[in-house]
Amino acid sequence: MSFNKKERVLISFIIVAVLVRLFPHPPNVAPITAVALFAGTHFSRKHWAILMPILAMSVTDVFLGFSMITPIVYLAFVGVTALGFVLKKMNIGTVLLSSLLFFVVTNLGVWFLYYPLTPEGLMTCFTLALPFFGYAVVGDLFFSAALLFGYRYAAKRFQLA
């Protein structure tokens, strides 16, 4: 398995973002949604793009813990990566769309696993999740900007294709 210079730089940015997930942080202010979108928009080899957020989560979840919702969270990140494939860019709009996709998919999973499967249960689940969505958006915007602008700087500095 060999990586070209561009892929090595991309992976190094993702490793740093993953390590940040291990530091204490407010709820849902984490880099993984940004990693998923970044990988989807920057990796030419799609299988690596999909694996990046999954590997990031798997490695950090060994230390942070797994739960019943973990498979749905991973699925949501695959969806964000696929969104990156389709949209092919990172900007405020795509980051917000990624945040919304993650919010909807994971909270549908939470509703299915932990709430009554009624319209009232759905409303309660999503209403209680709204504060976490605010934190997620802040984190997604911050980490997406850090990845995107950091990578652009490195691409110029190291003359990446």
Image (tube, helix red, strand yellow):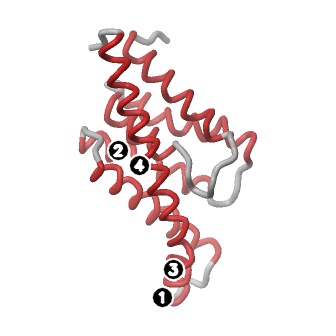
Query: Which of the labelled discs sits on residue 141, or is there none?
Result: 4
Q: Residue at x 46, y 55 (%)?
A: 138
Q: How far apart are labels 2 and 3 at the CA level?
A: 27 Å
**Mark 4 or mark 2: which comes first in sequence?**
2
Q: CA distance from mark 4 to mark 2?
A: 18 Å
Q: Which residue is mark 2?
A: 82
Query: Which numbered disc flags the more N-terminal residue, 1 or 4?
Result: 1
Residue at 45% over, 49% down: 140
Vertical comparison of 73 with 106: above or below: above
Is the residue marked by circle 1 packed among few (<14), some (14-19), or many (20+) residues within 10 Å? Answer: few
Q: CA distance from mark 2 to mark 1?
A: 29 Å
Q: Position of residue 41 (x, y in %)?
A: 31, 35
- Which quadrant would residue 18 be assigned to in this image? top right
Viewer-side label of 1, 3: 3
Give SS at disc 1. helix
| SS under mark 4 | helix
Report which residue position mark 1 lands on.
Answer: 119
Mark 1–mark 4 Cα distance, whole angstroms, equals 31 Å
Rendering coords of residue 13 (x, y %): 48, 26
Residue 62 in the image: state x and y as whole percent.
Answer: 73, 40
Tag shown at residue 153? none
Instruction: Give the CA distance from mark 1 to mark 3.
Output: 12 Å
Say which of marks 2 and 3 sits in front.
3
Mark 3, Cα crowd under 10 Å, few <14 / some 14-19 / many 20+, is: few
Helix, strand or loop at disc 3?
Answer: helix
Q: Nearer the viewer, mark 1 or mark 4?
A: 4
Q: Determine whether, in the image, residue 37 is placed left or right of residue 69.
A: left
**Can you tell which mark lies on residue 127?**
3
Q: Residue at x 33, y 56 (%)?
A: 97
Residues at marks 1 and 3 touching, judged by CB atoms closer than 8 Å: no
Discs 3/4, front: 4
